[in-house]
Image (spheres, grey):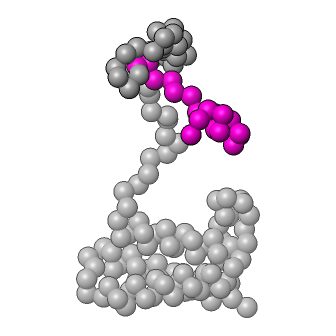
Amino acid sequence: MSEQEEEKEGFRVQDRRSFTETGERRPGSEDTHQERSRETEKPPPRESRPRQAPPRREEVPEIDFVTFLLSLGSQTLIHLGEIPDPVSRKREKNLLAAKQTIDLLGILAEKTQGNLTREEDGVLQNLLTDLRMRYVKAAP
């Protein structure tokens, strides 16, 4: 396709290679190459400072089964309106969500029976008893 045909279609193809197909340097390619290399030069680096990790707001506790149970217990207390929601800072009751979380803990107790350590089983049973009592008091 000739240059005239290419221009008719609305775009123009220009070969910017420094060498021809036979390996000869194209006329004016040295200047073009130097201009392009100046354009792509990186700016000098800023002062190098060692990067520091951002400060942590709080340490995240190690996750284990007891921590998981306690997080579900905390969610239930939020749904019962006994502690404020950490995001909205409001105390709102959502008894359906509280009941579902308590039922979930009950399912965990059934399915993990005989597979928990004494500590894990004790935490789960005490948590379930406490949350069920709080739910009965909160429900109409």
In the foreground, 22 or 43: 22
> Going 46% across and 83% down the picture, which residue do you hit?
105
Relative vertical location of residue 94 with respect to residue 65 in this rendering, above or below: below
x, y (%) of residue 97? 62, 81
In the foreground, 7 or 107: 7
Q: Tell me the quarter of the picture where residue 63 sits.
A: bottom left
Residue 17 included in the magenta stretch of the image: yes
The magenta-colored residue range is 1-19
x, y (%) of residue 47? 48, 12
Q: Tell me the quarter of the picture where residue 100 sits.
A: bottom right
- Per the picture, the main secondary structure of the magenta-coloured stretch is loop
Q: Count of labels shown? A: 0
> Going 49% across and 40% down the picture, which residue do you hit?
56
Where the N terminus falls, by quadrant?
Answer: top right
Where the C terminus falls, by quadrant?
Answer: bottom right
Relative vertical location of residue 5 with respect to residue 28 in this rendering, above or below: below
Q: Tell me the quarter of the picture where residue 137 sits.
A: bottom right
